[in-house]
Amino acid sequence: MKSKKSIYVKIEKKANRKLPSSNQDGFSKPKSDILIYKLPPNGYPIDHPFNKEGYQYILCEPDQFAPHRKEFDESEDFAGKPIPGWLYRKFCSKSVLVAMHDRAPQLKVGDDRLTVTGEKGYCMARATHAVNYGNWYYEIDILSMPEGSATRLGWSLEFANLHGPCGYDVFGYSWRSRKGTVFNNSRGKHYSEYGYSEGDTVGCFIHLPEDLNGDDDPANAPFYLGTTYKESPLVKVKNYLYFETKDNLAQVQKTLRPLKGSSISFYRNGENQGVAFKDIHCGVYYPTASFFKNVVIKFNFGPDFKHPPKDVKFRGLHEIAEEHVIKQALCELRFFTEHDGRTGQSTNTDQTE
């Protein structure tokens, strides 16, 4: 990837320009001299930055509802300066798919953005959307698993290492195809009599109670609106803009605590294998698959499941997409309510939730 550069904008005096057009596929021309091309059929730029240890990159689009946009365009004060992040917002996919940026680069993602092929050693891919409360379910079809290959499927927090198997660190929980072992923090334990193999359908169920048992972290609240990135720097990669954020894994690990009553269970071809994990960490969980060698799998986030669980009430992962768009919009609105729309400085001295 080419080195990141600050994004600058040329603004003409008394320019009379229209707001940038946008739709679910992306947007064409922003109010600057930067051309942002329309997104490809799979909904994500072909050349893009990958999340890596310590850094995350979030695709963004113009925020047409940002206050003072017209003032920004017609002002000389911003000429030759970086574009303020408040002019943009996180791009929200309207469907739950495999994340193009939040995966190991060597994995091959199909045009449907549901089929993934592994290569060589263990590495991971995650979905575009996550959940933090309620009962949720998704399936994975094992399309091909040649001799000597393996996979670990399950759930992970956003901080899980993409260049290892799910369950390699404290942030992931998985069920392995070989011997049916389950893993968290590189610790395996016996789970089911057999694992799963080519032709099987693996169901992944997670239960995250809405009662947080005294947990006062807003990020763990059932109706947590999410994160706005408007105060993060913008970087340009191949004519697209991304928010760049940094992780502090050491600090995150110190604050991890169990969510009492939570659990993860797995199904093989509709048969419940039992509870694999109890009292998992509080947080936001992504559907996750990890691959050893050239395994081919296909995610199914619903609504048409091959083997929907009959022993528990659940929601299919597909339902979270619309909810995520609404929450993100409310999150951006809250930002503009609490801040001076364009300066990024708070207008509210009380920052408690």
Image (tube, grey):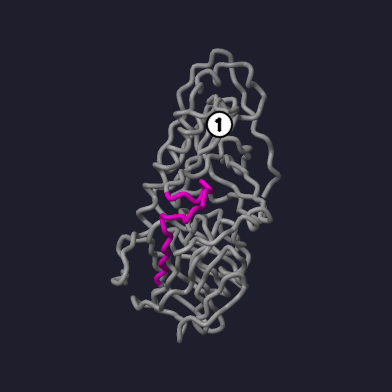
Residue in front for this viewpoint, 46 or 8: 8
Q: Which quadrant of the view contains residue 205? A: bottom left
Q: For this rendering, which residue is in front, 186 or 237?
A: 186
| Image position, residue 265 (x, y; %) | 42, 71
Q: Which residue is mark 1?
A: 350
Report whether 349 appears left or right of 194: right
Do we see residue 292 in this rendering? yes
Query: Would you say 87 lies left or right of 41 here?
Result: right
Q: Is residue 133 left or right of residue 37?
A: left
The percent coordinates of residue 310 (x first, y second) are 28, 71
Query: Is 218 contained in the magenta span?
Result: yes
Q: Which residues are magenta?
A: 203-222
Q: Nearer the viewer, residue 287 or 1?
A: 287
Q: Which amino acid lies under the numbered mark 1 shown in the image of this protein? A: Asp
Number of numbered discs overlaid on the protein picture: 1
Asked whether residue 146 appears in the rendered view, the answer is no
Vertical position of residue 187 compared to residue 116: above or below: below
x and y percentages locating residue 177 in the rendered image: 50, 79
